[in-house]
Amino acid sequence: MPSLLSVNVGMPTNVPWQGRTIYTGVWKYPVHGPVMARRLNLDGDGQGDTAGHGGEQRAVLVYQIDSYRYWQRHLGRDDLEYGQFGENLTVDGLADDEVCIGDRYRIGEAEFEVTQPRVTCYRVGLRMGEPSLPALLVSHHRPGFYMRVLREGRIQAGEDVIKIASGPGELSVAEADALLYLPDRDIEKLHRAVRIPAMSPGWLSSFRGLLAAAEHEGTAAETGEGEPAWEGFKGLRVAAVVQETATVRSIQLAAPDGSRLPPARGGQHLTLRVPGAGDPAPIRSYSLSSATGDGRYRISVKHEPRGLASTYLTTKLRPGALVDVAAPRGDFVLHPGTAPVLLVSAGIGLTPVLAMLHELSASRSEREVWWIHSARSAQEHPLAAEAHALVGSLPHAREFIFYSAAAPASKTAGGGIVHGRLSKEAVIALGVPHDATAYVCGPASFMTDAKDALSAAGVDPSAVHTELFGAMSAITPGLREHSGRRPHQPPGPPDTGPVVTFARSGISTPFPETGSSLLELAEACDVPVRWSCRTGVCHTCVTSLLTGDVAYGTTPLEAPADGEVLICCARPDSDVVLDM
């Protein structure tokens, strides 16, 4: 019979790591005597990053003594002690390829249910002094697993682990782990995974996304959907320049030979390399402001006083000029369906949602559409008449425009203009439909407030999609320090390696000869980064590769899609441009 060999706990602490500080609870140590297992944790235990560890679904982490022995042989180590893998319960038995999601166990006075495999996280590699361990745990099918506490009670080392129920899906921990992180997924297993009630919500959401992508794969392959229309940059001609406001210009781009450009989706963006704006030519990304299928692209650019590219585009660019443009990209696009659509924007953030409004109008959509926009004043509201006309072309659309420079809040006789801030109270008062899908774009603080307001108004937070100007928000689990600095050149003299351009952040810099990854270069430049495992497993760091070639120091367990790169383990083989 399986048995509990050790109960291990540890509170989060600050740990030095690569010149920074990580707040982590991965250091666990054996406890002698009984320990109380509670709904959210064991007594005396804690997690530093509660977004990825701990909580009701991940109250207890389990690892097996057989896996200890396996890693001792594989790594040539004889120094492994209970708790070394960050687990709370070290057990004899309960192999990952035998335990299933939803299995239930009794230990002492407490009862538990298996909810998911271990989260792939760099911190277990930090604890073991083996940075590649997160990838090894997955590739060798020995992740360990989490349980939630069904009945609180005391447990202690030496007690039997008694199975009291089997999971309904018969999907083992090892199978579930491979299903999320490894290629060549079994569709039948994905269907089983999404039907297991005990599966933790995070993993359940991931499996639903993988299932939807797998079922859509055939159609996408036939139509070429999701693939960039061309690789790298290609020259497009400036067909027209229109002054929208004192600070905003719209720029129409066409193929030099007069042919129609490939269609783009509303909400996607273009990345431009702008000769004449600087040396080297700056590279920036701008959302499309229309998606009408007329064979041209349009962007609408706001002049930023210290912006090299925006200054050139809004003051010097003339019709007939050529600019280098990467194909339309981005997944901030309208989801199919019949649910109401909320298009919410502030300032120049109107551009991607305006393109969505064009798409809805062009398709003569019967969906209920709400256009909600915030600007300082009518004089600082570009493309207002165009948006108003598009709303008027849709049979079930309405608009609400908030001008924050005028107060107090009051609706004008026109019915669509409100003088005042677009506040939470204002959104609630609008009575937006609860079953709507929302698309939000604007400054980061606006999007945070808008998401909060929509949630308070009854919209499901999972149905709120956002698009951020500039670099994406960072994901740096457990990292204590956040510099808050704008992206900048790395410290020290310039190196001589291939030039790496972070397009959204406006930084171009040579890759260091001693550099280990694109991720570490981005961190040195304070470019916002997104990562978790740092070993090519979780794909949190996946980034669009606009041009150039890379090589992997550590081969990813699953290769990213064409045109994408895992920056945590990639180095440039040539000059590269990254959409970050």
Image (tube, helix red, strand yellow):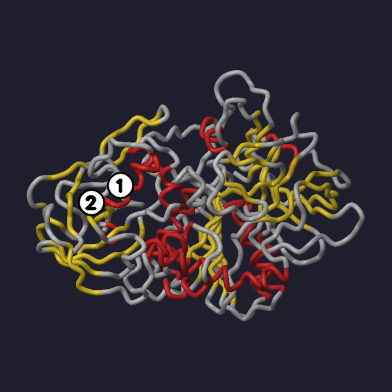
- Image quarter where the C terminus lies is top right
The residue drawn where x is 68% and y is 23% is: 496
CA neighbours of label 2 inside 10 A, class few (<14), some (14 to 19), many (20+): many
The residue drawn where x is 71% and y is 36% is: 574
Amino acid type, residue under disc 1 in the picture: Tyr
The residue drawn where x is 63% and y is 46% is: 579
Q: Is residue 304 above or below residue 288?
A: above
* Nearer-the-camera pick, 505 or 385: 505
* Residue bearing mark 2: 90
Task: Say whether disc 1 or disc 2 marks the residue closer to the N-terminus.
Answer: 1
The residue drawn where x is 18% and y is 58% is: 3
* Residue bearing mark 1: 68
Position of residue 89 measured from the top left corner of the image (x, y, whole percent): 22, 52
Determine contact: label 1, label 2, CB under 8 Å: yes
Q: Is residue 554 above or below residue 395?
A: above
Residue 402 visible in this rendered orientation of the protein? no
Q: Is residue 392 above or below residue 375?
A: below
Q: Is residue 224 left or right of residue 257?
A: left
* Nearer-the-camera pick, 114 or 141: 141
Position of residue 219 measured from the top left corner of the image (x, y, whole percent): 67, 73
Q: Secondary structure at mark 1?
A: helix
- Image quarter where the N terminus lies is bottom left
* Nearer-the-camera pick, 531 or 162: 162
